[in-house]
Amino acid sequence: MAARLVILISGSGTNLQAILDAISARELDAEVVLVVSNRKAAYGLVRAEHAQIPTLYFPLKPYAEAGRDAYDHDLAEQIKAYRPDLIVLAGWMHILSTAFLDFFPRQVINLHPALPGQFPGVDAIEHTFEAYGRGEVEFGGCMVHYVIPEIDAGAVIADVRVPIEQNDTLETFETRMHQAEHRLLVGAIRSLLNS
């Protein structure tokens, strides 16, 4: 029986597309049962609709008074109804608290475009490229890890180094990083589903 995946996005959904392509190619024995975005304009929602996958737009703004824990709890309640085997943060730009994570122990994973212990949080590709320019790192990389409340600090499931070439621009390095992210994320999901 195919594993049930819920994918959380905030942007264009290229990692979502990589997962959908891997499922179509039968590289993953899974189905995406829900795509969630905290941004209404996220193109990933359009990708999901084209693939006839249910979507949920769940913005933080209505929770300005109630707070993040209330948001996380209500989001978890919404997702729980879909009975996910695995929840994949694929470009999700929101830190999840224990109010969410306690619903899904060791079922929430995140793709982060830096190696373990390097450049947590946003703009990691840019930070890596700048650090290379200063001679502080020799290469970049990306990882998939379990989500904990601390940013990009959960146990690593898989990681891969991505070379930085001498003639790279930020854009060429970013393209290579995204290609590596897609392969790494699909591979990490496959290994978790097969374990």
Image: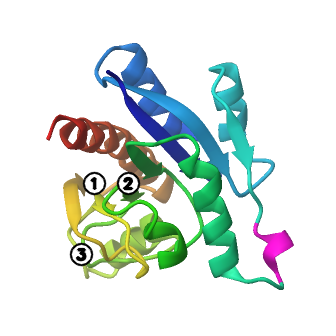
Q: Which numbered disc, 3 or 1, marks the residue that appears first in the sequence? A: 3
Q: Is residue 193 visible?
A: yes
Which of the two discs, 3 and 2, labels the residue nearer the N terminus? 3
The amino acid sitting under disc 1 is Glu
Q: Position of residue 101 (x, y in %)?
A: 45, 68
**Residue carrying label 1:** 165
The answer to which image quadrant residue 4 occupies is top left
- Residue on which disc 2 sits: 168
Farthest residue, direction left: 195
Magenta-drawn segment:
60-64
Residue at 59%, 37% (x, y): give it. 34
For residue 2, which quarter of the picture?
top left
Task: Look at label 2 and name its amino acid.
Answer: Asp
In the image, residue 62 above or below residue 163? below
Horizontally, is 8 left or right of 186 in the view? right
Residue at 17% over, 35% down: 194
Q: Secondary structure at mark 1?
A: loop
- Indicate the position of residue 9 as horizontal and vertical percent values: 59, 50
| Quarter of the figure with residue 107 | bottom left
Magenta part mainly helix, strand or loop? helix
Task: Give neighbour class at mark 3: few <14, some 14-19, many 20+ (Cα, 10 Å).
Answer: some
Counting from the top left corner in percent of width and height, residue 49 is at 71, 26
Q: Which of the two residues, 6 or 173, is positioned nearer the viewer here?
A: 6
Q: Is residue 12 visible?
A: no
Task: State the image coordinates of residue 175 (x, y, percent, origin top left).
Answer: 44, 44
